[in-house]
Image (spheres, rainbow, N blue to C red):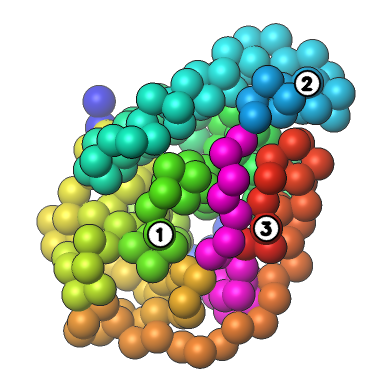
Amino acid sequence: MPRSLRSPGGSTLRFRFGGWLLLAALLLTGLSSVWANWDFSQILQTVETRYGTLGPARGRVEAWSQLLQGERDAPEPEQLNAVNRFFNQQLSFQDDTRIWHQTDYWATPVESLIKGAADCEDYALAKYFSLRQLGIPSEKLRITYVKALTQNQAHMVLTFYSSPTADPLVLDNLIGDIRPASQRKDLLPVYAFNAEGLYLPGVNGGNRSSDSKKLSRWQDVLKKMQAEGFTVGHG
């Protein structure tokens, strides 16, 4: 079922975009390496040592492991649909102030699955990590900041480009199905980023910036994933 459009939080649009743009501008070196297979039996032991007994959340983490195993050799469209559907069904939308008692917090996929809740950037990050683990190259994926026009709110989605100039597909927690960006008249793109750079809206997939600074918050996410038992590089 498509989800109704909900506010990403009580912050102003300017605050959300300003903070996200700063984070994205610092991120750019980080998103391309990883991606050895993950040992979820070991990960679950490490996660329970780190966070305590998982209870019902253990089933959500195990379901994520099964998803990745089952979709590893699937065609890309099937991988996109499976990952998008999984996180949209497993997680309920809540803003960071409610989940983490912080204005802006980047959660690992495991943290989101433990809580059973996420805000828009956590959905996008969980889908990004999953699709990279399934073998989709970083140049086909962009974490994209948009304005959700219905609510006049900053929002974050994951976009997939089958080619650099393709109409991207939008993986969004606000609706259940994946649609081309040209059909998402409710979303106004502001900028996007991936391992290759920062993209502003425009023809041919937008213009790419060469900015390549490090991002402390992104590094924090990677460090948390390493502490949870995931084999990740510096992006």
Task: Answer with mark 1 or mark 3, whichever residue precedes in sequence.
Answer: 1
Across and down, in percent, residue 223 comes to 77, 52
Say which residue appears at 42% left-offset and 49% top-offset: 135
Q: What crowding class fits label 2: few (fewer than 14 Cα within 10 Å), some (14-19), or many (20 or more)?
A: some
Q: Amino acid at mark 3?
A: Gly
Asked whether residue 207 is drawn in magenta, I would say no
Task: Answer with mark 2 or mark 3, whichever residue precedes in sequence.
Answer: 2
Badge number at residue 203? none
Q: Which residues are magenta?
A: 17-38
Q: What crowding class fits label 1: few (fewer than 14 Cα within 10 Å), some (14-19), or many (20 or more)?
A: some
| Residue reaching furthest to the left | 183
Instruction: Find residue 117 and report its image quarter.
Output: top right
Q: Is residue 190 above or below residue 92?
A: below
Q: Is residue 12 left or right of residue 185?
A: right
Cβ atoms at labels 2 and 3 below 8 Å apart: no
The secondary element bearing badge 2 is classed as helix
Which is more toward the observer, 7 or 193?
Answer: 193
Which is more toward the observer, 222 or 159?
Answer: 222
Q: Which residue is mark 1?
A: 137
Instruction: Find residue 84 and report its image quarter.
Output: top left
